[in-house]
Amino acid sequence: MQVLARASIATMAAGSAGYGLIADAALAIDEGRIAWVGPERDLPAAFAAAPRRNLGGRLVTPGLVDCHTHVVFGGDRAREFEMRLEGASYEEIARAGGGIVASVRATRDADEAALLAAALPRVDALIAEGVTTLEVKSGYGLDVASEIKMLRAARRIAEVRPVRVVTTWLAAHALPPEYRDDRDGYLREVVLAGMEAAQSEGLIDAVDGFCEGIAFAPAEIERVFEHAARLGLPVKLHAEQLSDLGGAALAARHGALSADHLEWLGQDGIDAMAAAGTVAVLLPGAFYTLRETKLPPVQGLRDAGVPIALATDCNPGTSPLTSLLLTMNMGATLFRLTPAECLAGVTRNAARALGLADRGTIAAGQRADLAIWDVAAPAELAYRIGFNPLHARVFGGDLA
């Protein structure tokens, strides 16, 4: 048992105004869980004799949650960065054999140890900014063995770093060259059969897909979701990034945890997400990298009461971003989210997008995953650019 005292605590509690801020606060931790939080003057007698750490007025928030990443991959795509600056579009790069498929060769060539070694510097950058929970997708192997290899590497991250890793099966990410003329065969032999094989190893926490003109059609994604349901796996979807194919509404009909990207989301999709409780995960890093101009319908999502999360979308091609703090700034600057919405987007709503009810807020019974900041006010976390004010990170009650 321990007490963190002389703190300003942003509880980020659901339904609270803004940050749910408690000034002159204290927080008690017992066996990796938050046992009590409130004004320090009200600290229960049961905690009076516990070891106490004086935080000197620092801000405490829930540990940050990066709910959409592709952090395990081989190689890089710096050349495509140059191509985009020379005028090539995302679609043109993809149709020319670049894009996602360009990462497949390097990922297939790397063994599990190499994938882990390449991922750890990216993971370390996120941890250094207060991230305590991290989602990692497959999707760059595009054959059963390579997809499973990616998820094994992702699981290994949590064995060698103090972070919770949530894994997502994303074989329906792109069509590999060997299946160019056999879409049905790829879905059957890789996406669906591989899903079963990976689940049998305990490697899948959720199933994702890319519903887009350059990827998979809604009817194909429906097959993926139906198979996931038979296996008892929750779903989420890359939807409405480049066009409106109705992917978000499809995801909502299947009770998806989240629909992600959403720049082209229409009112029907917003309404479906609101009815289903599906979280909108906005990815400003990809918007920025691709120099997009179509903004996601933030006000429509607000008006409908759809929870909004933010994530790095860390990937080698369209969002080589390993800073959730910068993501927050981008969410505010590019998408006009408020600083409070940005912080909710990387705590409470990000945890909800992963189906994790035991983190993302500071309340009794929650995991003691915390970030302690050298800032005077929570808005500073979204305000600053290229500055990391993290003082300490608490993971499961332990300083990490």
Image (cartoon, rainbow, N blue to C red):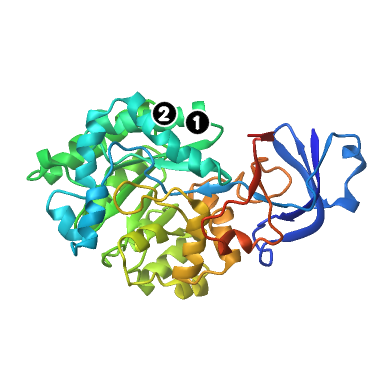
Q: How many marks?
A: 2
Name the residue beneath numbered marker 2: 202
Image quarter (top left, top right, bottom left or bottom right) of the C terminus: top right
Whether residue 119 appears in this view of the structure is yes
Q: Nearer the viewer, residue 399 or 211?
A: 399
Where residue 154 sits, quadrant-wise, is top left
The local secondary structure at tag 1 comes to helix
Q: 35 or 234: which is nearer to us?
A: 35
Q: Residue at x 69, y 52 (%)?
A: 374
Mark 2 residue type:
Gly
Q: Secondary structure at mark 2?
A: loop
Q: How far across and down, in percent of the image, does residue 254 sit?
A: 38, 53
**In the rendered image, which quarter contains the N terminus?**
top right
Percent across and percent down for residue 125 are: 49, 42
Relative height, residue 62 to residue 340 (above, below): above
Of 333 and 264, nearer the camera is 333
Q: Residue at x 51, y 47 (%)?
A: 355
Query: What's the CA distance linking mark 2 and mark 1?
Result: 14 Å
Crowd band around label 1 with a 10 angstrom C-alpha radius: few (<14), some (14–19), many (20+): some
Give residue 384's mark: none
What residue did someone put label 1 on?
158
The answer to which of marks 2 and 1 sits earlier in the sequence is: 1
Residue 252 seen in the figure: no
Q: Residue 200: which quarter of the image?
A: top left
The residue positioned 24% from the left and 39% from the top of the image is 191
Say whether residue 278 is left or right of residue 213: right
Q: Is residue 24 left or right of residue 153?
A: right
Callout 1, which amino acid? Ala
Position of residue 162 measured from the top left corner of the image (x, y, whole percent): 56, 32
Q: Residues within 10 Å of mark 2 (few under 14, many from 20)?
A: few
Query: Looking at the picture, how far across and down is residue 365, in whole percent?
Result: 71, 42
